[in-house]
Amino acid sequence: MKKIILILLFLPLVVPAQTIRNFSNEFLSIGVDASAFGMGKAVTASSNDVNSIYWNPAGLVGLNDYQGSLMHAEYFQGIANYDYIGFAKPINDESTIAIAVMRFGVDDILNTTQLIQDGQINYDRVSLFSAADWAVNVAYAKKLIVKDLNVGVNAKIVRRNIGGFASSIGFGLDAGLQFKRNNWQFGLMLRDITTTFNAWSFDDDELNNIIDIYNNLNESILNDGNPDNDDEIIPTVTPEKIELTKPKAQLGIARKFSISRDFNLLTALDLNMRFAQTNDVISSSFVSVSPAFGFQLDYIGRVYLRGGINNLQNQTDFDNSESLSLEPNFGVGFNYKGISIDYALTNIGGASGTLFSNVFSLKVDVSYFR
């Protein structure tokens, strides 16, 4: 599969590109923390730990002391690796700062652009490269004058690299609100409110090699004698150097229930909104909405059972009939003396039909060690 990843990576670079994209920097939409994955990512209103730097920075004010978090997940049966590390520190009783680093990468990809030269195959020309997306997030959260109303902002620097072929640097801002009243929790997360941009630079020689591959492929299609294949021709143009990511919004609501002295239940609903027409279950030319549902059952705040449903999509089947697809999620967790270990079985790619991933995360709350 790694042999075709090179072509997939460069497809956006050699087809007609739009400056403002409906789907850009999509690795930033994956999420973090196995406990959130287990709840179907429906945590916009309830997130209140170090991982709020991603889900809703307003939730960072829920920290009482230093917290750190680690996560590792694999995608495409281990071909792609997704890693995250976060750290948060209260400044005082009303504000908190946090920093996090994320990496989504595919390593040891075969570069076969020089495999054939002058009609001869030479395997010594095959090399390896990595394609990696990096993001560094810095967040600040503060309690407002209005009781139980918190606000947070998150600045992110995005670095994307495709071997020695192309690289980009970008910057963007997110902002969030959380409000609590009794057992109800409400949250609003606005992502890429500045239309996060990526400025791309390319190695012209390497890019021309890729374009030559497509030109040779198109020539073989035209000369194969079958006109039915002509619609497979791939146009090639000079790629855009500035890429903008459209804003997105998430609206969440959650409620806690006390089932008994030892058992508690948290239920949550998120509405994930893109300002573009997609296959989401609710879709229009202005906004598309995909709901996510999740729950968390805990025993004395130490053992957790989680479940959720997200990625509700309208899909067209082979017989042209339409059906609704969704992704279930499952998770468990254990917390003891400030150390939380969580596991989730989930589809981190968020695409229907892709394989599920095993996600593990670790969280440490320093307050238990003082």
Image: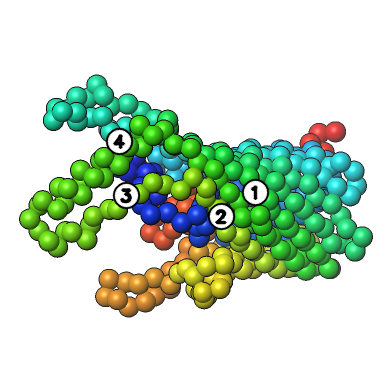
Residue bearing the label numbered 2: 245
Q: CA distance from mark 2 to mark 3?
A: 23 Å
Say left or right for 219 vs 368: left
Q: Residues within 10 Å of mark 2 (few under 14, many from 20)?
A: many
Q: Looking at the image, which is closer to me, 250 or 196?
A: 196
Q: Are marks 1 and 2 in contact (CB under 8 Å)?
A: yes
Q: CA distance from mark 3 to mark 1?
A: 29 Å
Q: Work out which quarter of the rendered image holds the N terminus and state it.
A: top left
Q: Is residue 244 visible?
A: yes
Residue 17 in percent (x, y) is at 42, 54
- Between disc 4 and disc 2, the foreground one is 4
Residue bearing the label numbered 4: 209
N-term-proximal mark, 3 vs 1: 1
Secondary structure at badge 1 equals: strand
Say left or right for 201 vs 177: left
Residue 304 in percent (x, y) is at 65, 54
Residue bearing the label numbered 1: 172
Residue bearing the label numbered 3: 236
Q: CA distance from mark 4 to mark 1?
A: 32 Å
Q: Residues within 10 Å of mark 3 (few under 14, many from 20)?
A: some
Q: CA distance from mark 4 to mark 2?
A: 28 Å
Q: Work out which quarter of the rendered image holds the C terminus and state it.
A: top right
Q: Residues within 10 Å of mark 4 (few under 14, many from 20)?
A: some
Relative to residue 255, is residue 101 depicted above or below? above
